[in-house]
């Protein structure tokens, strides 16, 4: 999934859950929470030197990719579980939203053809519920659909 679609998925998911007050930072949506959400939405791709965040990481992406590979530890089920736990235990809106954004990134990649290593480091085999291929027309439709959903919530 492209970085802008990951950001849209995180924002759309947060807005959907915000309507039902299911997020601990629902009452404190401000610059800190939005910034954390957007950064978290792209953060798992720090393991890819050519990703949006990888190109801006001043070499950190190279080392993360060398150690874990792309869609390795940063996209694993154990990290996903930890992030979900942190969303509901952290009191600071920036960090709770950052964790939510990163969790939404990993879940969105689960639905890509590439999948995620759900049981990493025990098993490196990727699990996928293949709905879209990264960069495909369907991904663009998903992005536009979420964008329209966000605009409808915010402006209607």
Image (spheres, rainbow, N blue to C red):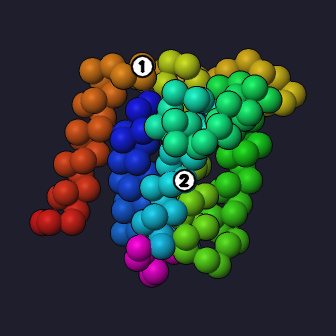
In the depicted view, which residue is nearer to us: 95 or 89? 95
**Which structural element holds mark 2?**
helix
Sooner in the amino-acid sequence: mark 2 or mark 1: 2
Q: Measure the C-alpha gap from mark 2 to mark 1.
A: 21 Å
Q: What residue do we see at 67% from left, 72% from top?
A: 90
User: Eyeballing the image, is 137 above or below 104?
Assistant: above
Residue 122 in sight here: yes
Q: What residue do we see at 33% from left, 19% from top?
A: 136
Q: Quadrant of the N terminus?
A: top left
User: Eyeballing the image, is 139 above or below 23?
Assistant: above
Magenta highlight on residue 29: yes
In the depicted view, which residue is nearer to us: 139 or 40? 40
Most extreme residue toward the front is 58
Circle 1 Cα neighbour tier, 10 Å, few/some/many (<14 / 14–19 / ≥20): some
Q: Which of label 2 and label 1 is nearer to you?
A: 2
Q: Give the range drawn in magenta.
A: 25-31
Q: Where is residue 37 in the image (x, y as percent from the top left)?
A: 48, 59
Disc 2 to disc 1: CB gap under 8 Å: no
Tag 2 residue: 40
User: Eyeballing the image, is 83 above or below 53?
Assistant: below
Most extreme residue toward the right is 122
Q: What residue do we see at 46% from left, 80% from top?
A: 28
Q: Position of residue 134 (x, y in %)?
A: 42, 23
User: Eyeballing the image, is 104 above or below 16?
Assistant: above
**Which structural element holds mark 1?**
loop
Q: From the viewer's perspective, tell me whether residue 144 is left or right of residue 4.
A: left
Picture disc at residue 133: 1
> Would you identify the image quadrant in which residue 97 lies?
bottom right
Circle 2 Cα neighbour tier, 10 Å, few/some/many (<14 / 14–19 / ≥20): many
In the depicted view, which residue is nearer to us: 38 or 151? 38
Q: From the viewer's perspective, tell me whether residue 121 is left or right of residue 25.
A: right
């Amino acid at each position: 999934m492209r970085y802008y679609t990951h950001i849209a998925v995180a924002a759309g998911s947060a807005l959907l859950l915000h309507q039902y007050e299911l997020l601990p930072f629902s009452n404190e949506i401000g610059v800190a929470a939005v910034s954390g959400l957007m950064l978290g939405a792209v953060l798992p791709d720090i393991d890819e030197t050519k990703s949006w965040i990888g190109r801006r990481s001043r070499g950190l992406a190279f080392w993360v990719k060398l150690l874990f590979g792309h869609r390795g530890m940063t996209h694993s089920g154990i990290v996903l579980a930890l992030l979900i736990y942190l969303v509901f235990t952290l009191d600071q809106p920036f960090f709770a939203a950052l964790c939510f954004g990163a969790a939404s990134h990993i879940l969105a990649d689960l639905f890509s053809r590439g999948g995620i290593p759900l049981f990493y480091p025990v098993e490196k085999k990727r699990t996928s519920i293949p709905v879209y291929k990264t960069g495909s027309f369907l991904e663009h439709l998903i992005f536009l659909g979420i964008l329209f959903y966000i605009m409808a919530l915010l402006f209607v």
